[in-house]
Structures are given as C-alpha cells and as structure tokens.
Image (cartoon, helix red, strand yellow):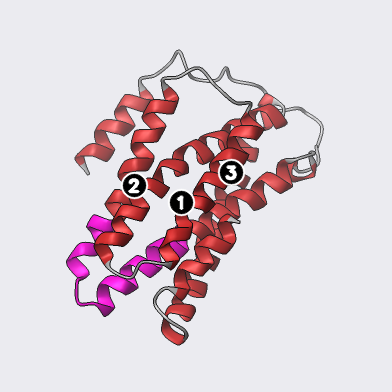
Amino acid sequence: AAIGAVGTVALLVQRRTEPLPASPPLEHQRSVLRLSGLPVLVVVMALLGVVFAGVEVTVIATARETGQTELAGVVLAAWSISSLASGLVLGGQRRVFRLRRQLLVGAVVMLVTLLPLLLVVELPAIAVVLLFAGASVSPTLIAGFALVETMVPVERLTEALAWVTVGISVGFALGSPGSGWLVDHVSLQAGFWVAITAAA
C-alpha cells in the first residue's frame, strides 16, 4: 500500500512528461479499433495477458500441489523483479530498436526464455527460469503501449490505450481458466503450455 501510494503521488507530480490536452473532435468519429494496426496490437496484448495468466496460475497450482504454497509469491516475485529491472534499464537508454521491432524481439525472447518451463518441475528451478523470462515482459509491454501513441491521433489516445488495456485483461481472464483446466485434467506443467502457446 505504501509503495503504491508513493508511486501514485510521484507519477501525479510529473508535469513535464504529461501529454498536452487535446480537444476531442466535434464530429462523431468511428472507433479507434478501425484504425490500421490497432486491432492487431490489441490481440498481441491480449495474448500477453494469456501468458501472464498461464504462468501465474500454473506456479500457484504447482506450489499448492507440492505443499509449498509459501513459495508461490517468491517464484512470482522473481518473474516481476526481472521485469522491473529490465524496465528501469530500458527506460534510461536511447531506443535501440524501432518500436515494432522491440515488440517483436521482446515477444521472441519471451517465448525462448519460457520454453525451459516444460523441462522443470521444482519451484526453485521454475523461479530461475522466470527470473530470466521476466526480463522480456517490460520491454514488450513498453513497446506495445508506446506503439499506440504512434497509431492514433492525440485526441483519441485515451480510448486507444483503454482498448489495449482491455486486451490484456481479457487475455488474462481467458488464460486463467484455460491454464487451470489443463493443470486439473492433464498435468501441472500442461498449464505452462498455455503461456508458451500464447507467447508463440
């Protein structure tokens, strides 16, 4: 709660990075989803949501089934910490790739680094895999959200960002029961197939 409160206040006081207000057009316009490229990006972000769901559900199920529920948070923290670290590093660097390429590279790295999840069964080993795989999360998300700004007029940015966020949420909502069903009816590791398939 304290970290969330401090972070929120720190974000609110940033004025130099705040986009300039833009008046909406007076005439009725079609949905931003009809703009070129945005529907594909929403689908990509939905698949990222499926990746997140597949990993989280399967890690928690593995912890439960092996009687190590207290380790679930630690394993997921490894996934989050490396994402945080890569986001901080990337945020402080000049952009190396164009945004589309950064999104593609991030997705490919995510897929490649998630593949070892099919070979490990113990939570410590899963934590090590996720520590490396998590490093691809922030760069991929950053590229996706930054791409939105290049695709839509500034006065439609809020709507476009909302659609991309909805995509992630819908992906998570669909990936969770899919992973859970596979874990319950096939095997613990089968839940990771959901994440890996979505990453691919």
Q: Quadrant of the N terminus?
A: top left
Identity, as a three-letter code, of the amino acid under mark 3: Ala
Measured in 3D between alpha carbons, the distance from the residue under mark 1 to the one under mark 3, in whole angstroms, is 29 Å
Tell which circle, 1 or 2, labels the residue nearer the N-terminal end.
Answer: 2
Residue 90 drawn above or below residue 28: above
Residue 22 drawn above or below residue 151: above
Query: Circle 1 — which element?
Result: helix
Kindly indicate whether the residue at mark 2 contacts the one at mark 1 (C-beta within 8 angstroms).
no
Q: Which residue is mark 2?
A: 80
Query: Taking the image as drawn, is residue 14 in sight?
Result: yes
Q: Which residues are magenta?
A: 52-75
Which one is in front, 198 or 105? Answer: 105
Query: Circle 2 — which element?
Result: helix
Residue 102, percent from left and from top: 58, 33
Identity, as a three-letter code, of the amino acid under mark 1: Thr
Residue 137 drawn above or below residue 121: above
Q: Is residue 53 left or right of residue 23?
A: left
Residue 182 numbered mark, or none: none
Which one is in front, 85 or 40? Answer: 85
Residue 200, percent from left and from top: 61, 56
